[in-house]
Amino acid sequence: MEKIKSYMIWVGGIMSMICFSFLILTHFFSCYGKQKEIEVAKPMFVEEHQSKLENFVFLVKESHSFCIPDKEQSCQEEATVLPVASASGVVLSSSSSHIFVLTANHFCENSNIEKIMGEVKIRIFIGETSRLSNIVTSSKKADLCLLEALRFKGEDYKPTKLAKEMPSIGEEVFNVAAPDGMASPNTRLMFTGKFSGCEGLNCVFTVPATFGSSGSAIYNKEGELISLLVAAAINFENVSMGPHVNTLNVLVETVEETVDIY
């Protein structure tokens, strides 16, 4: 036992000397331990896809804890905020005071568990900006949800043009999404695939999708919006589905009867 203890002390001493020497060297070669901050340039977009990338929206569903005031709690403190889900979306248009974002309805809906957790709110992130949003209208059948949020000073979004018809089967399509919540102000994940046809008002694309891709925009080669991804094939996430462009046009036309979004 004494030999084992002595050996451990010896090893510990050697390791301490190595660590100390390493700290001295790193301190010397790092300009006394202080590193200069690296400035990260703002993202530059390919002109062909600029509006698609700039109009991408990352959405987070937040649960804000309820507060019931009593003798021990006044509710003056900020509520606890817990992110519970994420999705993708697209800036459809903007007015002088608001922006309008299109995403998947199943993201906008709240489950019973989410309702129990607290007040559910949807926060949208566009580039380096963040703001809460409200639901303007939604369609469970089409799985579409239109949100509105305040437009910040200096923001200028190019309206997303809706296509009049679906492309031909085999034509290339483009998708901007945040699968698994992968999104940041300096990155945009863009995917390409092929339009693969429709069964009624449900259309198919060979575009990879998973959790977080819900609500992401699908564009044709002219840069027009043709659908949103709302589902992916089980066990084969390179096949995804979304509503027919006619459904998107009907939703916009219906909303414009009461709200001027274009």
Image: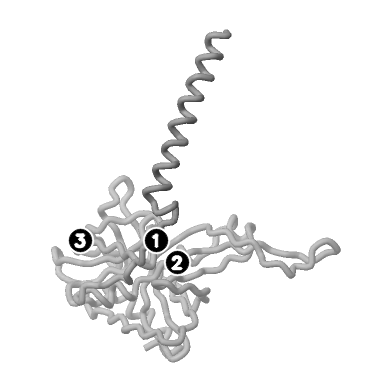
Asked if one can make out residue 142 in the rendered structure from this viewpoint, the answer is no
SS for callout 3: strand
SS for callout 2: strand
Give the quarter of the figure containing the C terminus.
Answer: bottom left
Give the mark nearer the N terminus: 1 vs 2: 1
- Tag nearer the camera, 1 or 3: 1
- Please provide percent x and percent y for residue 208: 27, 55
**Disc 1 residue type?**
Lys
SS for callout 1: loop
Mark 2 sits on what residue?
59
Q: Residues within 10 Å of mark 1 (few under 14, many from 20)?
A: few
Give the quarter of the figure containing the N terminus.
Answer: top right
Asked if one can make out residue 8 in the rendered structure from this viewpoint, the answer is yes
Q: How many marks?
A: 3
In the foreground, 86 or 218 = 86
Residue 193 badge: 3
In the foreground, 182 or 26 = 26
In the foreground, 147 or 204 = 147
